[in-house]
Each structure stands twice: as structure tokens, then as C-alpha cells.
Amino acid sequence: MKNLRLISMLFILFAFANLFSNDIVGKVIAVKDGDTIEVLQGKETYRIRLFGVDCPEKNQAFGNKAKQFTSDKCFGKKVTVRVNNKDMNGRYVADVILPDGNNLNVLLVKNGLAWHYKAYSKDKNLAKLEESARKNRIGLWADKNPIAPWDFRKGKKPDYTVSKKEGKYIASKNSKKYHKKSCKQAKEIKSANAIYFKDKNDAKKAGYAPCTYCKP
């Protein structure tokens, strides 16, 4: 009985290993977003989620640019998909190798169009590429307050507020107006509710409208 169980376990492990031991080689027939594509191999279509990277969502800043970049690089082309695993949505998580030998996952991070997905990847090269893109403000890193897609999916928003010393404009947590510091209405804001912004654009991005009294 023990031998039968052992044989069964070995068979399952062998089948699982074999599933991911073979590359998928086929034509890219769809680009869903920056990090998700569909590949046709023979008569079988595989949905591929790029391993180790997370691109901005479609309705997020740089989401469409990431999708266009991926489309330009691989749509209609024959690629090699090196499968790492399969996720809970049935997608094959993999590295995608382009016809010229470049790794699509790497290119996205290098060009500032994806985050290194550190929750699922410990790849040191991707980490270094993200650090370099951040330092040089490439792609999405040109934004002062880029928000990670995993936070964006949870509905989180970037924090544009700064310290009282740095802030040129002031608003209350209980209103949707921002003011000049010298504004009469600004002086009525309690310190516990006061928030500060470095410039007008940050206040607007945070959802605040200009005060009609002081017209900042």
C-alpha cells in the first residue's frame, strides 16, 4: 500500500514537472495589457502572465503605454515562452523571449513601464533595472508619485501631501478646497485637520479644488 502511494506521488510530481519543462513556442495573437498576452501554439491558445513584473493597469497612468510597448514588441510575432508556474487564474506565468533574443519582462522594467514584482520575484537583475529606471526617471518614474499597480487595484491613491514647512498651500481633511496660507478661510482650519501641498497640481491630483475666495 505504501509503495502504491509512493508511486502515485512520484507520478504526480513527474507530471507536474513535465508540464513546466517544455517551452511554449508560438505566435502572439492578443495583448491584453502590458504584462498579459495570448500565444497560439498549434491549435492551442495559452494565456501568459509575465513573470516577476507588474505593469500599470489600463486605467492607470502609463497603463496604455505599457500595453502599446508590449504590442509593438511581440504582437503577431513568434515568441518563446519559458514557463515558471501556473497561477490561480489558469494563466501560465513565464518569461517571454522575443525573436531577437531579448526578454520582454526585462525590457518593460528597463524602460520604466513595469514594477519589479518583488512579492513574487527575487530576481536581482530586475531589482537593479527598476532602481536605475527610478533614478533616471524613465517612463512611469517621471511621475512624482507613481502608485504601484497592486496598490491601485486595492483602490489606494498616492499621497501628495508634504510638511507644513514645504507646503505652499493648505487644505482641510474635512473639505475639498485648498487655499493660500494667507487666506482668511485657511486660518480657520484646525491644525489637526490641516494638510499641505507643495504646488497646485498636487492639490488637484489629491481631489481638491481651488478656494473661490483667495483664488490660489
Image (cartoon, grey):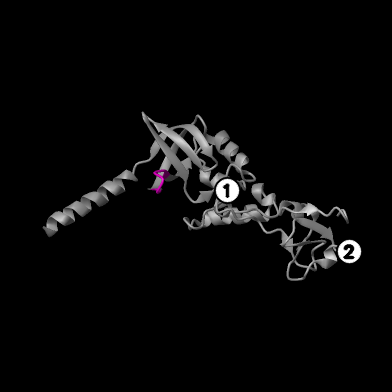
Q: Quadrant of residue 1?
A: bottom left
Q: How many marks?
A: 2
Comparing 140 with 130, the one in front is 140
Q: Is residue 88 magenta?
A: yes
Quadrant including the C terminus = bottom right
Q: Is residue 134 above or below residue 167?
A: above
* Kind of residue indicated by mark 2: Ser
Counting from the top left corner in percent of width and height, residue 65 is at 62, 40
Q: Dot 1 lies on which element? A: loop
The residue labelled by disc 1 is 114
Task: Name the residue at the left extreme.
Answer: 1
Name which quarter of the figure residue 81 lies in.
Answer: top left
The extreme bottom residue here reads 191
- Does dot 2 land on a helix, a strand or a loop? loop
What residue did someone put label 2 on? 182
Which residue is at the front of the view, 195 or 49?
Answer: 195
What residue do we see at 83% from left, 61% from top?
A: 168
Tell me the magenta residue range.
86-92
As shown in the figure, which amino acid type bears the numbered disc 1? Ala
Q: Residues within 10 Å of mark 1 (few under 14, many from 20)?
A: many
Q: Is residue 48 magenta?
A: no
Please state the horizontal and vertical placement of residue 194, each as a whole percent of the image.
76, 66
Where is residue 165 drawn, in percent x and y?
A: 80, 68
